[in-house]
Image (cartoon, rainbow, N blue to C red):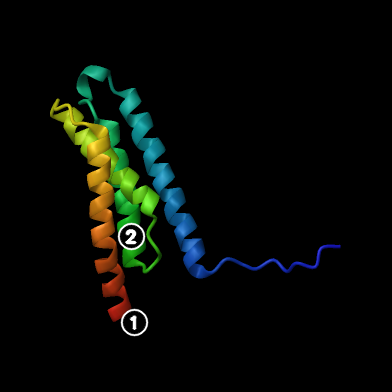
């Protein structure tokens, strides 16, 4: 018999799970909506811009609710937003250098965010 006691998730873990589910829901609704509209009415990069805003928005809400942000979704969201905007304006931006810039900016911003939340405790 297994003696492990199942622990209930903390309120922050439950909130984070709900936020992730809402983000997935928004993403799927956005994709479905874009696919319903004829291609000639949907600018290039629209889905990337939407995905970027959803991922960055998710992390902004996490930050405001004092839940740890996800490095992966922040970087992915930033990259999607930049690439989507470049597609929208029909500018061919090199993906890898942009990804490096986004990662570098994240590394600079993260300590500032952590310092601010540490000071507020």
Q: Residue at x 33, y 30 (%)?
A: 33
Residue 115 location, quadrant:
bottom left
In the rendered structure, find residue 121 and report the number of the disc placed on it: 1
- Residue 16 shown left or right of residue 81 in the figure: right
Whole-percent x and y of residue 102?
Answer: 25, 47
The mark closer to the camera, 2 or 1, is: 1
Q: Earlier in the sequence, mark 2 or mark 1?
A: 2
Whole-percent x and y of residue 8?
Answer: 62, 67
Whole-percent x and y of residue 65?
Answer: 36, 67
Q: CA distance from mark 2 to mark 1?
A: 18 Å
Question: Mark 2 falls on what kind of element?
Answer: helix
Q: Residue at x 27, y 55 (%)?
A: 106
Whole-percent x and y of residue 77?
Answer: 31, 45
In the rendered structure, find residue 61 and report the number of the disc placed on it: 2
Is 36 situated above or below 98?
A: above
- Residue 81 in view: no
Q: Quadrant of the N terminus?
A: bottom right
């Amino acid at each position: 018999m297994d003696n492990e006691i199942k622990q209930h998730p903390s309120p922050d873990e439950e909130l984070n799970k709900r936020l992730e589910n809402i983000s997935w829901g928004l993403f799927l609704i956005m994709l479905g909506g874009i696919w319903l509209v004829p291609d000639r009415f949907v600018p290039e990069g629209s889905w990337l811009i939407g995905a970027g805003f959803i991922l960055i928005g998710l992390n902004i809400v996490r930050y405001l609710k004092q839940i740890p942000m996800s490095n992966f979704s922040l970087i992915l969201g930033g990259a999607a937003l930049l690439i989507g905007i470049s597609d929208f304006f029909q500018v061919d931006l090199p993906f890898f250098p942009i990804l490096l810039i986004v990662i570098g900016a994240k590394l600079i911003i993260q300590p500032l965010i952590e310092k601010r939340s540490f000071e507020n405790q």
